[in-house]
Image: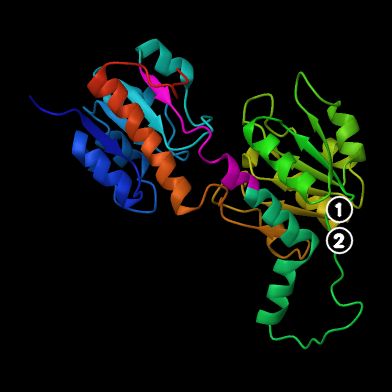
């Protein structure tokens, strides 16, 4: 009896590939770059399972190209904004994601880029690389520490709560906002020294941080985003930073990723990193193994995996 067929849309850690090859007929787009849309549609055809990335759009077109035998889409991410869940549900296709395993790693990065911004670490690195003259002085590149600052978490799920724990360990005060708990968003924006975003991208959260929201923030406050880029209106953010209506931003994600708004690139009060929230070998392996386990559950054991979202 032939083994189920699986397509993976990107190169992933060796351990994950070995485990997939143990159980499936595996076809991999062996590149750090995503396949072109036409190639993606061609290579999903006839597959029983797909292991896709957050940059791969799963919609009616892709599901039709795959065919009626498709049984599962394992998303190599915790966010599932790239997937039309209703389209999958209508076809009886299971969708899984990778919760929990990236919580601590993403929370660590939140604190890392916040410190890099407030302590001017990235700015200092650029200064040295430019070959500028410098010497220790009492007023050289003074930044801010974390103790006593008020952190406003927009979103309070697994990652938001992990950030809160780390922030309190650094002496920060913390408030949060969700649709059902915490303080009103307007109050959080007006009072927080750091506004940090930890919520999924939905139609309700798209451009949640727009010009009006940025205008509510204190001129000394900074914005941190490690969730999804389109939650922030990037053009509005560039205007607020350029006009010094807020003090800075630390961004791991971008509105049109991997494109970055050119207005951000020349600003010294911005830290920019290329979507590294979950980027440790241990975490990326763990994410991949959750995908492997979900594929095995559906395609070999005939059961719904615990990390199924549809």
Residue 288 x/y as whole percent: 38, 40
Residue 99 belongs to magenta span = yes
Which residues lie in the magenta part?
A: 93-107
Residue 57 falls in image quadrant: top left
Q: Nearer the viewer, residue 284 or 32?
A: 284
Q: Residues within 10 Å of mark 2 (few under 14, many from 20)?
A: few
Classify mark 2: helix, strand or loop. Answer: loop
- Mark-to-mark CA distance, 2 and 1: 9 Å
Classify mark 1: helix, strand or loop. Answer: loop
Name the outermost residue toward the front.
Answer: 169
Q: Is residue 30 above or below residue 188?
A: below
Residue 112 x/y as whole percent: 68, 56
Residue at x 54% of width, y 33% of height: 79
Name the outermost residue toward the left.
Answer: 1
Frontmost of labels 2 and 1 is 1
Residue 105 x/y as whole percent: 57, 47
Residue 134 falls in image quadrant: bottom right
Q: Quadrant of the N terminus?
A: top left
Identify the residue under disc 2. Answer: 144
Identify the residue under disc 1. Answer: 147
Residue at x 88% of width, y 56% of height: 244
Residue 271 as seen in the image, left or right of residue 215 = left
Residue 303 falls in image quadrant: top left
Residue at x 67% of width, y 31% of height: 206
């Amino acid at each position: 009896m032939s083994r189920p067929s699986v397509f993976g849309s990107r190169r992933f850690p060796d351990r994950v590939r070995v485990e997939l090859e143990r159980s499936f007929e595996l076809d991999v787009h062996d590149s750090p770059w995503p396949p072109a849309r036409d190639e993606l549609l061609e290579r999903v055809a006839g597959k029983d399972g797909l292991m896709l990335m957050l940059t791969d759009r799963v919609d009616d077109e892709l599901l039709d190209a795959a065919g009626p035998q498709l049984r599962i889409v394992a998303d190599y991410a915790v966010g599932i904004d790239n997937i039309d869940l209703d389209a999958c549900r209508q076809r009886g296709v299971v969708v899984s994601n990778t919760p929990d395993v990236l919580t601590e790693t993403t929370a660590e990065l939140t604190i890392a880029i916040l410190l890099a911004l407030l302590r001017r670490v990235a700015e200092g690195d650029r200064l040295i690389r430019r070959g500028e003259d410098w010497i220790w002085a009492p007023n050289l590149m003074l930044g801010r520490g974390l103790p006593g600052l008020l952190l406003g978490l927009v979103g309070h799920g697994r990652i938001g709560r992990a950030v809160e724990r780390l922030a309190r360990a650094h002496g920060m005060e913390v408030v949060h906002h969700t649709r059902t708990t915490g303080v009103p968003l307007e109050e959080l924006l007006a009072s927080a020294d750091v506004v940090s975003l930890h919520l999924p991208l939905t139609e309700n959260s798209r451009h949640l941080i727009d010009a009006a929201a940025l205008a509510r923030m204190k001129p000394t406050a900074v914005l941190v985003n490690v969730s999804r880029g389109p939650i922030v209106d990037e053009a509005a953010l560039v205007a607020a930073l350029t006009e010094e209506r807020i003090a800075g931003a630390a961004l791991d994600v971008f509105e049109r990723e991997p494109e970055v708004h050119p207005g951000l690139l020349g600003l010294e009060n911005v830290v920019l990193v290329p979507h590294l929230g979950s980027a440790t070998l241990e975490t990326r392996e763990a994410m991949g193994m959750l995908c492997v386990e979900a594929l095995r559950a559906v395609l070999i054991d005939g059961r719904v995996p615990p990390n199924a979202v549809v």
